[in-house]
């Protein structure tokens, strides 16, 4: 009998055993383990007895109708807790007008504001922020996207996975404060970009993959002005988004997973739960898809950057440097920053690559190009730090400044919204999917 079948057999035996029978007990901590009868080791597979199979298929038949078993709530403290006690930076933006760096902390659900010139000394445990926005009133949770209004310095924060709301705070907000404005978003919003010329707000949605466009001042349950969504769009688990307003272009980073949707797409949000055709899911190489900035409906991309030469590997946030005609990509799983021309297409190599141990890049997800100070600012999920470089940095180049939220060398656990856990009894390991 296989180990799996022996385990199932054991569970059923315990559930159907005569409870009046004397049992041996073993104390483990404060719990009691009722007698376990080991099964003999048999080679090969074995068929389940018919009565056992019936018990598995219809467990209710073993319950006594005259002895209801009320549910109980067990409140027990954990034996130990696995958690990262330090902020983990998921996105970054620079308030160039006020010389401040704003960082999203997706681990502790915070927005942290630092002086732009902050540089954590090697021996220091961390750098203290100037202000922190955090608490239940803020509605900041699994915050992964960030935008700073260049005129008002308002902070736009995107929530992913749990709270389907974009929140907006004034520049001086701090503590457990309510947002000045809220906008309902489709589930799993990730990226944000703003066309200041036309006062339009662009949001990427991971699943179904789409780009939702609102008036910049939209709030509440406002309907989008247009939606880019459909089977022909090439959107596949959409993440970062960047705008080239000079040339009227929109760039979207795609992880690669997608499915076919029954309605085909269109200029509307659609039904997340009912639109996907079962069994149609596929995986594609990661890509950057390019569209007209006013694209809507099931519009195919103008161009696609995709292929092994691109080095794209879970491309997260992107940034378009309109002044220099360059597209910057935070390349999460490759621990690198990629730079392409805004005119690139196909299986092209990046014009610059920032990568290597000296860079201190570790799972970079957020990126901001500060053209006023000619700097490149990166948020790294993998090592509790934001790193700053010259805008044109490439190769294995060390940062010119570093903002750390934890001691030097402290590992970031990157436990981000685990949906379930499992226990590997053979290796005595806990498996946590993120």
Image: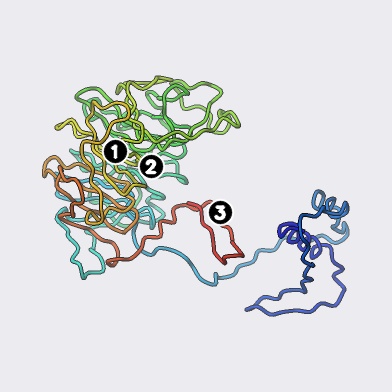
Quadrant of the image occupied by residue 209: top left
**Separation (CA) of disc 1 from disc 2:** 11 Å
Say which residue label 3 marks.
Answer: 420
Locate the N terminus by quadrant: bottom right
Quadrant of the image occupied by residue 123: bottom left
Q: Depth check: 74 or 428 in front?
A: 428
Residue for point 54% across, 72% down: 79
In this figure, what is the number of numbered marks? 3
Query: Measured from the top left, where is residue 81 in percent x and y?
Result: 49, 68
Residue for point 14% across, 40% down: 371
Q: Determine whether the residue tagged by mark 1 lies in a helix, strand or loop.
A: strand
Q: Determine whether the residue tagged by mark 3 lies in a helix, strand or loop.
A: loop
Q: Determine whether the residue tagged by mark 2 lies in a helix, strand or loop.
A: loop
Categorize mark 1 by other alpha carbons within 10 Å: few (<14), some (14-19), many (20+): many
Chain-order first, disc 1 or disc 3: 1
Query: Measured from the top left, where is residue 334 in percent x and y?
Result: 34, 47
Dot 1 and dot 3 residues touching (CB under 8 Å): no
**Separation (CA) of disc 1 from disc 3:** 30 Å
Residue 318 image label: 1
Residue 314 image label: 2
Using residue 90 as the reference point, say whether residue 374 is left or right of it.
left
């Amino acid at each position: 009998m296989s180990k799996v079948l022996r385990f199932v057999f054991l569970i059923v035996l315990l559930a159907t055993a005569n409870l009046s029978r004397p049992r041996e007990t073993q104390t483990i901590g404060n719990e009691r383990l009722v007698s376990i009868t080991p099964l003999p080791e048999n080679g090969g597979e074995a068929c389940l007895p018919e009565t056992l199979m019936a018990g598995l298929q219809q467990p209710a038949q073993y319950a006594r109708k005259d002895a209801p078993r009320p549910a109980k709530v067990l409140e027990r403290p954990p034996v130990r807790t696995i958690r990262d006690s330090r902020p983990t930076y998921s996105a970054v933006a620079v308030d160039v007008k006020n010389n401040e760096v704003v960082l999203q902390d997706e681990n502790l659900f915070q927005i942290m504001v630092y002086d732009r010139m902050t540089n954590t000394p090697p021996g220091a445990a961390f750098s203290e922020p100037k202000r922190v926005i955090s608490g239940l009133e803020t509605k900041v949770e699994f915050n992964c996207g960030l935008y700073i209004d260049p005129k008002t310095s308002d902070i736009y924060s995107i929530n992913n996975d749990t709270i389907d709301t974009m929140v907006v705070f004034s520049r001086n907000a701090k503590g457990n404060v309510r947002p000045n404005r809220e906008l309902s978003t489709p589930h799993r919003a990730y990226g944000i970009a703003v066309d200041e010329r036309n006062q339009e707000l662009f949001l990427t949605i991971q699943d179904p993959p789409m780009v939702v466009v609102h008036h910049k001042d939209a709030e509440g349950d406002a309907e989008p002005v247009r939606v880019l969504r459909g089977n022909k769009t090439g959107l596949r688990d959409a993440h970062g988004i960047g705008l080239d307003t000079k040339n009227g272009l929109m760039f979207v980073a795609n992880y690669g997973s997608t499915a076919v949707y029954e309605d085909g797409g269109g200029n509307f949000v659609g039904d997340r739960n009912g639109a996907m055709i079962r069994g149609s899911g596929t995986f594609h190489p990661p890509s950057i898809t390019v569209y007209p900035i006013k694209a809507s409906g099931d519009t195919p991309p103008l161009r696609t950057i995709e292929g092994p030469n691109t080095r794209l590997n879970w491309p997260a946030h992107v940034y378009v440097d309109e002044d220099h005609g360059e597209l910057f990509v935070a390349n999460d799983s490759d621990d690198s920053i990629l730079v392409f021309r805004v005119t690139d297409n196909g299986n092209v190599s990046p014009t610059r690559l920032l990568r290597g141990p000296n860079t201190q890049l570790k799972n970079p997800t957020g990126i901001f190009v500060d053209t006023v100070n000619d700097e490149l600012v990166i948020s790294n999920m993998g090592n509790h730090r934001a790193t700053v470089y010259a805008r044109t940095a490439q190769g294995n180049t060390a940062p010119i400044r570093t903002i750390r939220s934890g001691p030097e060398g402290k590992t970031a656990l990157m436990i981000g919204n685990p949906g379930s856990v499992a226990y590997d009894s053979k290796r005595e390991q806990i498996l946590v999917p993120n």
